[in-house]
Image: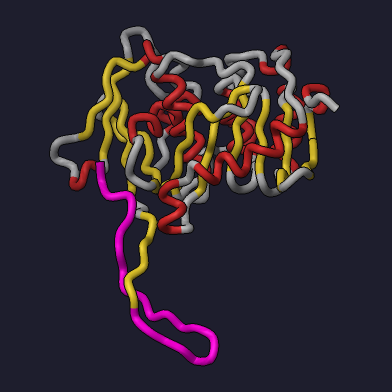
Amino acid sequence: MGRVTVRRPVLRLGAGGTRGRRPDTLAVEEPLEIRVAGRPLTITMRTPGDDFDLVAGFLAAEGIIGAAGDLRAMRYCADAAQQNTLDVVLAEGVRPPDASMERAFTTTSACGVCGKASIEALRTDRPYEVAADPVTFTPEILAALPDRLREAQRVFDRTGGLHAAGLFDATGELLAVREDVGRHNAVDKVVGWALRAGLLPLTGRILMVSGRASFELTQKAMQAGIPALAAVSAPSSLAAELADDAGMTLVGFLRGESMNVYTGAHRIQV
C-alpha cells in the first residue's frame, strides 16, 4: 500500500502580516489502473489504501459482480510502479465487462461515473429491491451520524482534505468507514468491504457521506441494496429522482438536529 499522507513545506501567511515556513500534511492522490484479466478497464484517482475494497465496490456498482464469490483473485501487478495497477480475475462463469465499459481516460477524484455514455446507461438492472426494505429509524439516530462519522475520520484530522463514507445500522452503530480524496471512491471502498465480507445486500443499513449526495452515490447505494442515504450537504435533482424511483430514503443537509428528507420519509419515525 502506498502512502496515505505526505509532508510538504508551505509559506504560512497570517493576520497582521505574520509569515513563516512550516511543513503541512497533505492527502495523497495517485492513479489506480483497474484491469480485468489483464485488460485495462479504467484509471481512477484515489488515496492509496483499501484498494481491494475500492475495486470490488467499483465492479459491484458497475454491475460486473454481485458477491464475493464472483471474485477469484485480485493482485497488484508486480511490474507496476508503487503498486498502482490492480488486476482482477473473475470467477468462472462471471461475464467480463463489455468493451463499451472501458474508459479511455482517467476518472478524476471528483467524478465516479464520467466514463458512462449517457445517464440512461447508469440505470443498470437493479440487483436488489430496495423499496421493499422495511427498516425505520428515528430523527435522533440520523442526527447523530455526522458526528460519529467525523470522529472516525483519522486521516482527515491530519489533512482536512478527504471525503468519508460510513455504513451504519438502524440503531446508529458504525459498521465501517472509509476515507478518500474522491467521495465516490470512499463509497466504493465501503461497499467493496461489505461485498468481500459477504454482507450484500446491505438491508437495514444507512450510508452516511461527508459531502453532497450526487446521482453517482445514490446509484452506488442502490446497487448495494442500501435503503437510506444521508449527506451533510445537498443532493442533486437527479439523485432525488433516482432515490424516489428506487424507493430509497434520501436525507440532505443533515446538520445538528435539522435535516431535509427528500424521499422515503415513511422510514423515519416522527
Image: 14 above or below 255: below
**Residue for point 22% across, 33% down:** 76
Q: Above or below — where is 188 with respect to 202?
A: below
Location of the N terminus (image quadrant) = top left
* Quadrant holding the C terminus: top right
x, y (%) of residue 80?
18, 42
Q: Looking at the picture, tell me which residue is in the foreground, 81 or 209.
A: 209
Residue 78 magenta = no
Residue sitting at the far left:
79
Residue 3 among magenta residues:
yes
* Left or right: 199, with 76 as reference point: right
Vertical order, 96 against 121 (above or below): above
Q: Residue furthest top?
A: 93
Report whether 11 appears left or right of 202. Answer: left
Most extreme residue toward the bottom, as rendered? Answer: 17
In x, y percent, where is residue 162? 47, 51
Residue drawn at x 71%, y 44% as measured from the top left? 254
Q: Nearer the viewer, residue 188 or 93?
A: 188
Confirm whether residue 118 shows in the render.
no
Give the residues drawn in magenta, as a range. 1-21
Residue 9, percent from left and from top: 31, 73
Q: Quadrant of residue 226?
A: top right
Q: Is residue 92 left or right of residue 255?
A: left
Q: Residue at x 34, y 35 (%)?
A: 51
116 vs 94, left or right, is right
